[in-house]
Amino acid sequence: MSMPQSLEAMPRTLESMPDSSESMTGSLPPREYRIGDVARHSGLSRQTVHNYTIMGLISEKEWSRGGHRIYDASVFAVLERIVRLKRSRTLREIRHLLKETDRQRRPNLE
C-alpha cells in the first residue's frame, strides 16, 4: 500500500484504520519522527499518540534538545498492532501483551 497523496485520504478513526493485511504507513523511509509525523503517517490523532506514549504502549527513541519526543520507524508496527488488538482487548490488556512480547524478544541478561 503506498502513501496517500493528500492528508484528506488518511484514515482518522480506528474504524477506518487498515486491517491486518494492510500497512498503516506504506513504506516509510528510515528516519526520526516527531509526534505530529507519527500522527500524520499513522492516521491516529496527536492526542492518541501522546496517550499511548504516556500509558507505556509505545515509547520514544529519544528527546530532542527542544524537548520533543522523537520516535523511530518501529513505532508504526507497534501502533498497527495496538489498533488490531484494540478491537477485542482493553488498553491495559494490550500493554501487558506488548510488555510480554518485548520481554521475550530481549535476551536474558541475568
Image (cartoon, rainbow, N blue to C red):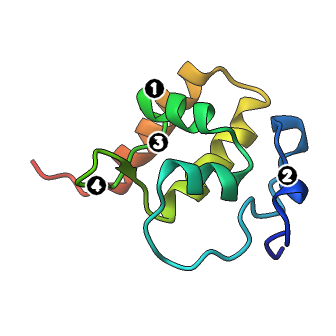
Front of the two marks 4 and 3? 4
Q: Residues within 10 Å of mark 1 (few under 14, many from 20)?
A: few
Q: Residues within 10 Å of mark 3 (few under 14, many from 20)?
A: many
Q: Name the residue under label 4.
A: 64
Tag 1: amino acid:
Met
Q: Which element is circle 4 on? A: loop
Q: Is residue 57 left or right of residue 21?
A: left
Q: How crowded is mark 4: few (under 14 residues within 10 Å), some or many (20 or more)?
A: few
Residue 58's mark? 3
Q: Mark 1 points at which residue?
A: 55
Q: In this view, does 56 lie to the left or right of 2?
A: left
Q: Which element is circle 1 on? A: loop
Tag 3: amino acid:
Ile
Frontmost residue, 55 versus 50: 50
Quadrant location of residue 100?
top left
How many angstroms separate mark 3 from mark 1 (CA)?
Answer: 8 Å
Earlier in the chain: of badge 1 and badge 2, it is 2
Q: In this view, does 54 lie above or below 29?
A: above
